[in-house]
Image (tube, rainbow, N blue to C red):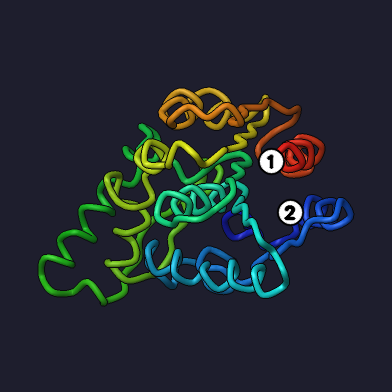
Amino acid sequence: MHGKAGGNKSIYHLSGKLESAGFLVEMPSSTPWSPNRIYDRTYLETLKELDGAVDKLKAAGATRVVVGGHSIGANVALGYAANRKGLAGRIVLGAGHFISGKFMGKKLGKYVARAKKMIAAGKGKEEADFDDINQRKEISREMTAEIYQSWFEPKGPANMRKNAASLPGELPVLWVAAKDDRVASKVLKRLAYDKMVGNPKNRFVIVNGGHVATPDNAVEEVIDWLKEL
C-alpha cells in the first residue's frame, strides 16, 4: 500500500521486483488516503475495504498473505494486522501518520477537539475543514468529523503504538526505516517496534536515504525476508 496522497508511484519499483521474484502482488490503486479519495472512509471502514485486496490474492492462488505498506500505508497495514487473523506476516516501510507523537499531537490537537465537539453535538457526519500533516507540512482537508476523529484521535484505531503491542506473537514483522527518516528509524522503533511481542523472524532494518525512497531502497531486504518465511 502506498503513502499519503502519493498514489502507487512510490511502490511501483518494489511491486515489480516482488512479482519478478515469484510473489503474487495486489497493489490497491484507490485507497481512502489516495489523491482522488483522501479521507473518505473511517479507519475501521478502510480495514474492511482492504479485505477485498486480500480476497483477490487468495482468488489468484495465494495460500499465505503478507500485508505491507509505506508511510501511512504502513500504519494501515499495522492496523489491519492487529485486527485480522490468519496473516503470514507484515511489512512496515517508513512508518508514518504518527498521530500519538508530540509533533502531530500538538499541531492537530485543536482539530481533534473540534471533531469531538461536533460528534457530541450530533454533527459527526457533517463535513468541515480539518488540518492534516504530510511530511511536516500542514494541509487543510475537508471531511466529516467522524472520519477525522478515526484517523487523528491519538487514542483511536490509527495509534501505531497500540496496534504494534496488539499484534499476535506468531505474526512475523519486517520493519524498515531510512537512515535519514528520524521518526521511523529512531522514535517509532522505540515506541512501536520495541513494543511488539518478540518473534524470532522479526527484523528491524535501516536502509540508506530518506522517507520517500524507503520502498526503493528496501527491495532486497523485503525479498530476502519473504523468502525466509
How far, Cα to Cα, is label 2 from label 1? 22 Å
Residue mark closest to the camera, 2 vs 1:
1
For disc 2, the neighbor class at 10 Å (few under 14, some 14 to 19, many from 20) is many
Amino acid carrying mark 2 in the image? Ile
* Element on which disc 1 rests: loop
Disc 2 element: helix
* Residue at the extreme left: 121
Relative image position of residue 68 (x, y in whole percent): 61, 50
The disc placed on residue 11 is 2
Q: Do the residues labelled 2 and 1 touch (CB within 8 Å)?
A: no
* First in residue order: circle 2 vs circle 1: 2
Q: Residue at x 53, y 63 (%)?
A: 33
Quadrant holding the N terminus:
bottom right
Residue ID for mark 1: 229
* Total count of labels: 2
Residue lying at 75% horizontally and 27% vertically, measured from the top left:
208
Q: Name the image quarter holding the C terminus.
A: top right
**Residue 84 or 43: which is nearer the viewer?**
84
Amino acid type, residue under disc 1 in the picture: Leu
